[in-house]
Image (cartoon, rainbow, N blue to C red):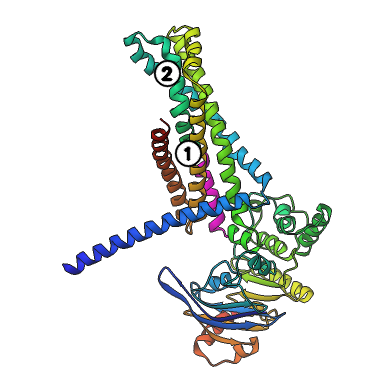
Amino acid sequence: MIRGIANAIEGLGHRILSSIANLGKTGVFLGTSVLYTFIPPLKFGRVIKQISFIGVKSSLIVILTGAFTGMVLTLQSYYGMEKFGAEALLGPAVALSLVRELGPVISALMITGRAGSALAAEIGIMRISEQIDAMEVMALNPYRYLIVPNLLAGIISFPLLASIFNVVGIYGGYLVGVQLLGVSEGSYFGEMINFIDMQEIRIGLYKSLSFGLIVTWISCYKGFHATYGAEGVSKATTEAVVTSSVLVLVWDYFLTSVMF
Amino acid sequence: MIEVIDLHKSLNGIHVLKGINFKVEKGEILALMGKSGHGKSVLLKHIVGIMKPDRGKILIDGEDISTSRGSALERLRKKFGFLFQGGALFDSINVFENVAFPLQEKTHMEKEKIREKVLRELEQVGLPGVENKYPAELSGGMKKRVALARCLCTDPEIMLFDEPTTGLDPVTARSINNLIKETHDRIRFTGVMITHDINQVISIVQKVAVLDTGTIEFTGTPEEIRTTQDPMVRQFFNDNELCENR
């Protein structure tokens, strides 16, 4: 009985220690990556390639989700605003929600699903097929070749994609609000200028920039430390998506409460 | 020269390497034999500094690679070529780019010179004309040849081979072994080769070491391994002879 309790406490302690160690490893991984970002040479070609992979290739899914998010947001907002006779503020309401909150968050979640999972899987396969070891044996630094370009590409691509998401979302809202529900075009766009200033746009951009770092950091970390076999890569990919998505939402709440 | 002194390593609580000691003189090739899962690949990764020991030293030309960091480690690693079991070719780039990769990244060679060298290395491993193919388009034997070309193009002083012929048909295996022998005759690298088939490499290597349950149980010349009375080593060697006679 006592031995069983002792074993359970020991197991719990072991799990806590292992979680703390993993947290430390994740932090060291980010620190090392940031360090190599500032130590030349920067692999500029690889940064461009990864911007294409994370950014350009995610644009279609971001446009699609942006359009439908704007449309449903308008529909839902109109339903509530009509009750108070505030349809004229539909445009600013949609734009504010998109620019400050939905644009950065939903685009980050979509890119996590598309590019974050692919990054974790690609780096994970490189790990289990010893390609990363081969790189090290050639006296080449895998952080410089694999991780730094992805982090930079994430930081650059996420704000751009969030901006695309916002613009498409606002036009999606325009289609539903103005063309379908009959809100006047002048009030939909005209009022936006009065309610949205550069500060709102900056908040959204800061958010998506930090999401870019979080998603690429976690995805690269999970892939880089993938254990052996197909199961290891599959686990790394799942963990990358789940952890990145949760962290995006937690960090979003934290930033919103700070910048509110 | 490679000298491993009292090397210990535990992985996931299992003591894998329990005080490994051996020495490979300059220009010599050591065949490392042993059962699967007994730490041969782990030992090879320690020699090149990818893994760090819990205790012990790995001296490369007198410098301990296990404690080297930064530029010192980079300088030591430039001496190495490592032929991984699966080739470890970068699958997102083609054969030419794979072989050229270390030259482009680590030397100041002109593009034209790199091109000439890569094509020459590919020809030497018997694969002219494959430079535009991707690793996924190659057979297992071709992948190992390309990987060998990638290792050799930097003219390494030390070559490590992790089961270079495992999983290949006897003809391809023999051709890869011949290729290693020819290259050794040409550039006299120092080498460590993990193998399960001593008969195939007996003409290539100058020394044989047998790793069993985390320790080196036997070290000697290929002739000595043939005549040893050690039952564990004999069993290993006889198994190979048996396979060859079948």
* Residue A49 can be seen in this image: yes
Task: Classify residue A125 as left or right of residue A10.
Answer: right
| Residue at the disc numbered 1 | A113
**On the rendered structure, is B3 left or right of B151?**
left
**How far is mark 2 from mark 1, CA to CA?**
28 Å
Residue A86 pos. (x, y %): 37, 10
| Residue A93's disc number | 2
Chain of the residue under label 1: A
Q: Secondary structure at mark 1?
A: helix
Identify the image quadrant of residue B205: bottom right
Q: Is residue A71 visible?
A: no
Residue at figure coordinates x 38%, y 57% from the top left: A20
Q: Nearer the viewer, mark 2 or mark 1?
A: 2
Q: Which residues are magenta?
A: A115-130
**Is B113 displayed left or right of A48 in the figure?**
right
Could you tell me which residue is drawn at 55 percent across and 49 percent down? A122
Q: Quadrant of the C terminus of chain B?
A: bottom right
Res. B142 image quadrant: bottom right
Assess whether residue A230 is covered by the magenta stretch: no
- Quarter of the picture containing the N terminus of chain B is bottom right
Residue A198 against residue A20 in the figure, above or below: above
Circle 2: element type: helix
Precedes in sequence: disc 2 or disc 1: 2
